[in-house]
Image (cartoon, rainbow, N blue to C red):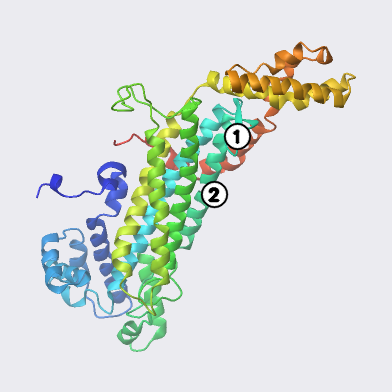
Amino acid sequence: MPSSDLYQNPLIARYASAQMSQLWSPRRKFGTWRRLWLALAEAQAEMGLQIQPNQIAEMRAHLDDIDFLVAAEYEKKLRHDVMAHVHTFGDACPGARAIIHLGATSCFVTDNTDLILLRDALQLVRDRLVAVIDRLAHFASQHANLACLGYTHLQQAQPTTVGKRASLWAYELVLDLHEIEHRLEQLRARSVKGTTGTQASFLRLFDGDHSKVRRLEQLVAEKLGFAQTYAVTGQTYTRKIDSQVIDTLSGVAQSAHKAATDMRLLQGWKEIEEPFEKEQIGSSAMAYKRNPMRSERICGLARFIISLQSSTANTLATQWMERTLDDSANRRLVLPQAFLACDALLLIYQNVAIGLVVYPAVIRQRLMNELPFMATENILMDAVAAGGDRQSLHELIRQHSMLAAAEVKQHGQPNDLLQRLAQDDAFAGLDLEAISDPMRYVGRSVEQVKEFVSEVVGPIREQYAKQLSKRATAELRV
């Protein structure tokens, strides 16, 4: 059938990068299986088993020429994917056929491969995350001094700055970065653990020599790029690892969803906008629309990633004894798709962070509509310092505030509280214009942004300078 007649995963067809898609591809997976069989044979030969150099050389020569049609035929007949590829590899390496997969169980290739893919995919997500943190920090620095309304309960609150708000978005990603770094640090190889995790087959291969089995386990792990192995396993590495990794990706998604929601609200108020291209169409009906489709897509992908937490949690919870196979189909879906979605989400987030457009005039207008009310406490204190009676002044401010609020709410008029106070003799002599300067009400916002970028983002930029130097423009595929 033509591809247009079959369902295609939009994570691959529309959203994720080629890099992440290739990482979870069949070629990468089964090519890694062959590299695992080679690593096992090399280590067994180094440990004294009768495996010949020509057998290892033959295996090495056929790591990537996988005949997927032959493998599919074997699997159709054998109903076992690992043995299908053992036979396919054996057909390509007839001289090594007898020693391929020696002493191993299927999870030697499946689980070790998954751990390698988790490691490589986490590193790619980490690098994408660092790029977003860098761009948000740049945006925060640019707009550290731009006062804007703060919101609590989605109600107007004490002013902050556009840069300070962006630093909140960035800091949550910094915390996610720490989690990814921790997960990478804790990843281990399963290596050679045997059918139920007891290493019985390898103990037999080495005539009961426990030290040789332990050395084989470490040697294989090192060949896979891991310094350590999991202390104990059943047939599989504990599915706790999958659960922890997906929880970490969910954390990234949660942070991104929060920030993208803020951006959607701010775009609705015309304070900031995500990038909007010259010929982009916002609505098929309403030609004037500039819908925040990038931020909405971030939220949609984030919701999908967050939903996957329940799959890995339930898979872990239902692994009976040394393992059951009900994890297999679920993990084939969840692990790749969680990473593909997270990859796509971060590419979109980076694209948005690079191209955010700010409208200072709108931001100031919205702020100044509310600031007179917020300034009344300072006005009251200054008027008392000038010799006024605090209780009388408080009542006057209350009365003027109620009248000004009525004009705003009932008649849609601008907030004229400051003009009303200026005309009241009780407040004569006060510099109401200076008192109503928005920057008097943002506290340490500016300093906090500078400190955050210098003390928190600075070391990240230094640590990941190489990755940032290769940063792509993060253009969207659709």
Q: Which residue is mark 1?
A: 155
Is the residue marked by circle 2 packed among few (<14), some (14-19), or many (20+) residues within 10 Å?
some
Left or right placement of residue 49 versus residue 300 in this view: left
Residue 175 circle label: 2
Residue 189 seen by the camera: no
Asked which secondary structure carries label 2, the reply is helix
Residue 475 circle label: none
Left or right placement of residue 396 versus residue 443 in this view: right
Residue 36 seen by the camera: yes
Residue in the image at 38% along x and 80% along y: 213
Identity, as a three-letter code, of the amino acid under mark 2 = Leu
In the rendered image, residue 23, in percent from the top left (x then y), is placed at 30, 53
In the rendered image, residue 227, in percent from the top left (x then y), is placed at 44, 65
Q: Disc 2 or disc 1, which is closer to the eye?
A: 1
Residue in the image at 47% along x and 39% along y: 261
In the rendered image, residue 448, in percent from the top left (x then y), is placed at 65, 36
